[in-house]
Image: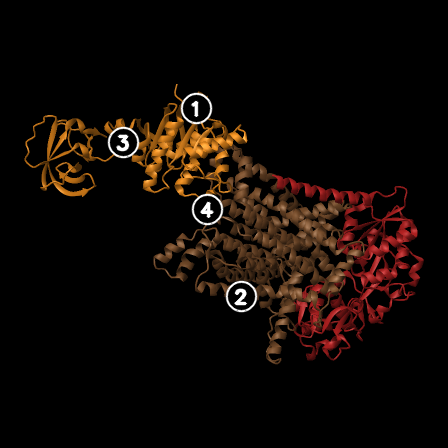
Amino acid sequence: MSYLECNDLKRTHRHFTLDLSFAMDKGELLCIIGPSGSGKSTLLSLIAGIDDTERGSIILDGEDITRTSIQKRRIGMVFQDFSLFPTMNVEQNIQYGMKNKTPEEKQKKTEELLELVGLKDYAKRKVLELSGGEAQRIALARAIAAEPRILLLDEPLSALDAPLRKRLREELRNIHCRTGLTMIYVTHDREEAFAIADRIMILRSGHIQAIGRSEELYNNPQSLFVANFTGEGSTLKMPRNQNIDEDSIAFIRPEDIIILPKGTEETNADSISLDAEVSGSEYNGSFYTVTLQTEYGEIRATSARRPEDDQVMLSIPKGKIKYLK
Amino acid sequence: MKKDDSYYIRHALPALAVTVIVFLLPVASVLLKARNIGRTITDPYTWRLLGFTVLESGLSALLSVVIALPFCIFFSRYTFRLRKAMLTISDAAFALPAILAALGFVIYYGNNGILNNILKSLTNGKASLKVLYSFKAIILAHVYLNFPVAFSLITTALSNMPDTEEKASRLLGASEVRTFFRITLPKAMGSIISAFTLIFLFCFPSFLIVMSLGGNPRFFTMEAEIYKRTYTDVDPSSSASLAVFSFAVMALLLLATGYGREDKKAQRARHKLKPLAGNKKAVAIILCILIILFMAPPMLSILYRAFFNRDGDFTLKAWSGIINRANSGAGTSLDAIINSIAIATISATVATVMATRISMAAVRNRLNFLSLLSSLPMAVGSVSMGLGFAFLAARIPLYNKAVSFLLVLLAHIVVIMPFAIRTILPGARHIPVRLPLAAKTLGAKPNEIYRRIEYPMLRSYRRRAFAFAFALSLGEVNATLALGEGRITTIPVLIYKLINQYNYQGASALAVVLLTIAIVMFAIGEKEEKQ
Amino acid sequence: MKKALSVILVMMLAICSIFAQSASESAANKDQKTLTVYAYDTFCGDWGAASAVIPAFEEATGIKVNLVSAGAAIEVINKVRLEGANTRCDVILGITDDIADKAYDLLESYNSPNINNIDSRLVFDPQNRLIPYDYGAFAFVYDSEAKIELPTCLEDLKKDIYKDKVILIDPRTSSVGTGLLMWTYNALGEGWKDWWKTMSRNALTTASGWSSGYGLFTEGEAPIVISYTTSPVYHVMWEDTTRYQALLFTDGHEVTIEAAGIVKGTKHRQEAEAFIDFLLTQAQIDLANANSMYPANTKLELPPAYDFAPVPEKIYTGSSELASTLVGQWTDEIVK
């Protein structure tokens, strides 16, 4: 049996309906990604108990918590805006959710947690004096301090700048490993999700589009939406076979395309060749992203070198072309 | 709505019950006596009274707000040494009973007042200013008494709004004037309307100032007519009808301004007050001087009268008179001071706690009508309220001083509650919704969230609400007289008694005591929150 | 939490102390003869006449008085009426002649022997249900330092020389104003309308009540104000000055008479009679002093300060009907 099971959950808002089931294991870090309005935060609200489900059940560690009040669920939550209590200092914030502990134990635990999040001497600091990154670490420490059975993180890094985001997500992954906490991490940043997730769930208008390990989702997307959402790629109106006409669309990742000089003989039978004209190229530091025009439409490819000629030939392994809907 | 959100509404219930019962009982007793409302509504005289009353209160409220606005904007942007003192000075006028405000005005602005005597001595008796006994005197006095309401409410609201939009507007090349009209004014609209409504409701039942300083028997308000029908005509049913009509008009105004006025989503950041620099220093000095010139003289006039007799000779007679009464046994000045402080402290404390509860319920359970409901006592003029209380007192066996004391307390609480709510509600709206959620996920019970997070976060608002409620209770006289049965003497009650004994100087001395207490209270209320 | 507790504690203490105080007040001897008196609030208040009169009466007669303050005089009547047959009230006092007719049906006659000592012009109820104990006269008071020509009658005030020199009080919101209105009616007949029309232009202002009107006067805003003949007494006693003096007009003066009566069906008729008689004799000077009125009993010597309160020869009395009719007409004539 899984650690967390959400069965047949349903919640209707004005413009969309959340309707899904999923399960996760103990100690797992599940990332939920999806465009805004896809229901990520609604799902977290349902699990945390902030919002009530209309139907279905939530089972945590074998216990049905569907109707349990927020306070009794023992589910931690870290918010995008940190939501630290401004009337308390760092220490008081962290100790707020601690239960059944002597003051000494609380003290000790607070020190441990502050060390865990890398803010050792911050206990007496005022909350309003913290920087964004510090505040989020304290929020995390506060959530962990309450010894939650599961920790929900609602876009915890989106209020921070890019380098800090990158650093913090590594730390977060580290903390996850060290504490073994089961976590659900909501983000709209694919890169972030790939970096830290054990598994990724892709949501779209209240429904699960895909759920699985990142590599799986990237390499074998089940739908065009998943393919697009997990990474770059071009869509071509390219027939699968000369004769069979299907309205599925060919999806190709940029790194799977090899750019050759025009007129190169195709030797590999597992690849297909296409004539193309270079319409633009961008330098990305370690590689170039080249935009090309083919008879089936625009295509983007990565290349180590800038193409010398405008007219080129593309070689694409057949196995890398996904026909998706 | 989650189950335990009912916590807020449950804990607001006692407060609501007290408000509704203590407010509804006198109102119902008035209502029951109203027989010929139809005739009241069709009587053109009623409408003429209404016309004049709306004119004077509307103009007073409008001018108070317009005059206060530039001060509010400046005071919500910059911090400087005299900032707090200015807020406190202007607030103090709020505690003045109408009779003393009128007296202070006469001593200062009167034809034979200090201002005119100065003018005469400067110009060898040629120049004199006729301020009083005209319509403009009514408005001036009302603006004087209510400027602090607008000043305090709007300044607080603006201080709590981030000024990023203003900065953006200036960066986009808009002038300061344009930025004000396009950005700041619309943002402040909620608090402006709120202040306007409050002042309107304060001026609507005013008649001592309207009649005595107006100088024309045609200047007569609804409340004065209610008073006339009650005490001169001794026609309870016709006075009750008019009271009901007047209540309906004010309640309508409250409804019209109460809904759809909810402040925009509260921002997290509260902007920092900037220190003064360059020519802003000059602006600050000018604004402070203007406030002092406008607010201080009538109060200083009362101080002057407390120490100087009408021939301009210094005397401590009024003070020794006050102190000596302490030895005469019953009804000492000390008793009055203790009573006043006790009643004001208790009622302001209870009102602040109850207002906090009601505000939180109104915000958390999205029940806007709650704040409106508890604002209704403002829609009842003091005469009608006194009428209701007097009628009520005739029904309750008030043979006991303790019962009188309790009733006076309850009446004070209901009278000051609307003000406390209007002060605290914006604060409640400013608490981010996520904070209680975060606390809940940490296992906190609603009670704990309220006690440890929300209540402390409202501290500065509660303190200000307490100060205003305290001042309002300190100056209250109608309910105290009606329910205290002459046995509960407060400072303003004693002031009226002294005046009835021709002792205006003693009344001024007591007024100085009253103002001092109020100023101390406001100084605490305006204390800057340390970040 | 501690703060909340301490607040509650303070409140409990405050309330308890008051209860204790009142409990000791009400712990009276059961066998003692008692009398319940309803009076208007300023009489009962700490500084009212009650503080002198009631203890003196209890001392003299051994009767315990239970004094109930019931608001304004009209509310005293209303309270007794509301309580009906169950009322504990034995005596009401402070009922003025202009509202007397509202109270008559609640009262019993008492032909006190002391009535013979009362100025007969004051005895407004021939059935002696309401018995006058003091009275006051409305008069214009002037500031002797203002150096104005003194008016001798109401009509004089209409003169141009008194433009902005007179402070009136509105008949609609003050009994002093109503008194002045009845005075002009009694003295000038139909001429009252013209008098008020002229005066509403000639007067500086028409104040809402006596307190604000008289305050304007003492601040020197105008040298003449409508008040009482007894007003100068206060300035003599309090400020030791004879600067302010009352004007006796040739028209005569309107008076207001305060009276007491025994409530119908009282179980303490004897004590009630004793109380009324006390009011008409020993209490007279205390009452006059505290209420700023003249004693009704003509056999008494007035305190020396009353030398500054000239007693008018010719007096008028009014009634509540007259007051109400006149205020209505006044409103139609002057402001509508």
Find residue A226 and name its label.
3
- Which of the pair C252/B61 is nearer the observer? B61
Q: Residues within 10 Å of mark 4 (few under 14, many from 20)?
A: some
Q: Which residue is mark 4?
A: B266
- Which of the pair C303/B340 is nearer the observer? B340
Q: What chain letter is assigned to the residue under label 1?
A: A
User: Secondary structure under badge 1?
Assistant: strand
Q: Which badge, 4 or 2, is on the more N-terminal residue?
A: 4
Q: Residues within 10 Å of mark 2 (few under 14, many from 20)?
A: few
Q: CA distance from mark 2 to mark 3?
A: 67 Å
Residue type marked 4: Ala
Q: Which chain is orange?
A: A
Q: CA distance from mark 1 to mark 3?
A: 28 Å
Residue at 71 percent across and 51 percent down: it is: B339
Find residue B290 and name its label.
2
Q: Are marks 4 and 2 on the same chain?
A: yes
For chain B, the rendered hue is brown
Find residue A177 and name its label.
none
For chain C, the rendered hue is red
**Residue B5 percent across, percent down from the top left:** 52, 35
Q: Which badge, 1 or 3, is on the more N-terminal residue?
A: 1
Q: Which residue is mark 1?
A: A60
User: Secondary structure under badge 4?
Assistant: loop
